[in-house]
Amino acid sequence: MTDAAPPVAGLQAERTQLAWARTSLSFGAATALLARTDFGVVARCVVLVLAAAGTTAVWLAGRARQREFADRPQPQAAKTWIVAVPAFLTLALGVASVAIVLS
Amino acid sequence: MGRDRQVVASRHEHVAASDDDHEPDYRFSLANERTFLAWIRTALALLAGGVAVHQLVPSSRLPGGRLALALACIGLSVCLSAMSFSRWRRNEEAMRRDAPLPSSRMPLVLAVGLSVVTILAIVIVIAAGESS
């Protein structure tokens, strides 16, 4: 670890980008399970739409991060709102799941 | 060490900011971000597990057991996702001030929560074995 800054920089951004990709995939998988729950057709459609929107939002946050990496010569710390997207959506999904399980 | 030099270098780039607050070494920031994302994935896995238990496990002689197991998994997921964001932010702030990283209760919460989930699962498996 002496003067290896440029390759390390590239790999750091790449690893972080892959972590975002894994997280959006996990979100998609978790919501897909939720959509299997047997409510009426209408409620199921609502859950499916919200699930797709949430997964897309997490993926887009990762994309925003990727664009930041591409635009700057050196990666910067994540902005708070980008980190808040998966945190808030996972929390909301958890609360919704509690409601679904109890109903 | 290279790491120390990097920290010093990034501090010099931001002399305009106050002495206490500076842009941390981006490698530490990105590692903090990846750790946060790993906690989120842990929470998502627990959530999926809880929902799967609710949908797939047949109700045994313990009808409340399945509900308790599902709620334990999902409740643990809610706790972890709520805590992970504030942990990320506190770590980020500590790194900006060169302060030691704050301790976190998240590993304790996960360990205790998983113990509860495991004990519930054992109870349900034993009850199902007796009823068959």
Image (tube, coloured by chain):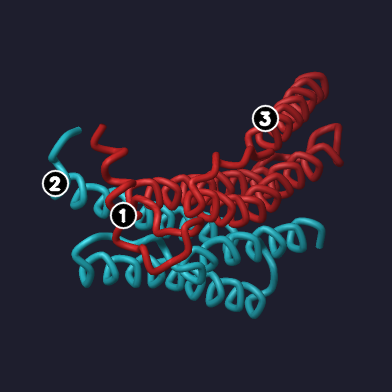
Chain colours: A cyan, B red
Q: Amino acid at mark 2?
A: Pro
Give how far apart the Cα atoms at labels 1 and 2 are. 18 Å
Could you give the CA–CA distance between mark 1 and mark 3, rounded to whole angstroms?
37 Å
Residue found at x 68% / y 40%? B57
State the residue position of label 2: A7
Neighbour tally class for label 3: few under 14, some 14-19, many 20 plus, Cα within 10 Å: few
Instruction: Give the camera-side residue of B61 and A20.
Output: A20
Q: Are marks 1 and 2 on the same chain?
A: no
User: For the residue marked with disc 1, what is the amino acid?
Assistant: Ser
Q: Nearer the viewer, mark 1 or mark 2?
A: 1
- At mark 1, the secondary structure is helix
Q: Secondary structure at mark 2?
A: helix
Q: Dividing the image into 4 quarters, which one contains the C terminus of chain A?
A: bottom right
Q: Are marks 1 and 3 on the same chain?
A: yes
Q: Which subunit holds the residue at mark 3?
A: B
Q: Tags 1 and 2 in contact by the CB under 8 Å rule?
A: no
Under mark 3, the amino acid is Ala
Q: Is residue B79 left or right of residue B19?
A: right
Where residue B21 sits: x, y (%)?
49, 59
Disc 3 secondary structure class: helix
Q: Which mark is residue B132?
A: none
Q: Nearer the viewer, mark 3 or mark 2?
A: 2
Please, which chain is the residue tagged with disc 2 on?
Answer: A
Mark 1 Cα-neighbour bin, 10 Å: few <14, some 14–19, many ≥20? some
Quadrant holding the N terminus of chain A? top left
Query: Looking at the picture, does residue B88 appear above or below residue A89?
Result: above
Instruction: Name the spot of residue B14 as percent of width and height, x first.
Output: 35, 63
Of the numbered discs in the image, which one, if any, rests on residue B10? 1
Query: Are circles 1 and 3 on residues that touch, CB within 8 Å?
Result: no
- The residue indicated by pointer 3 is B111
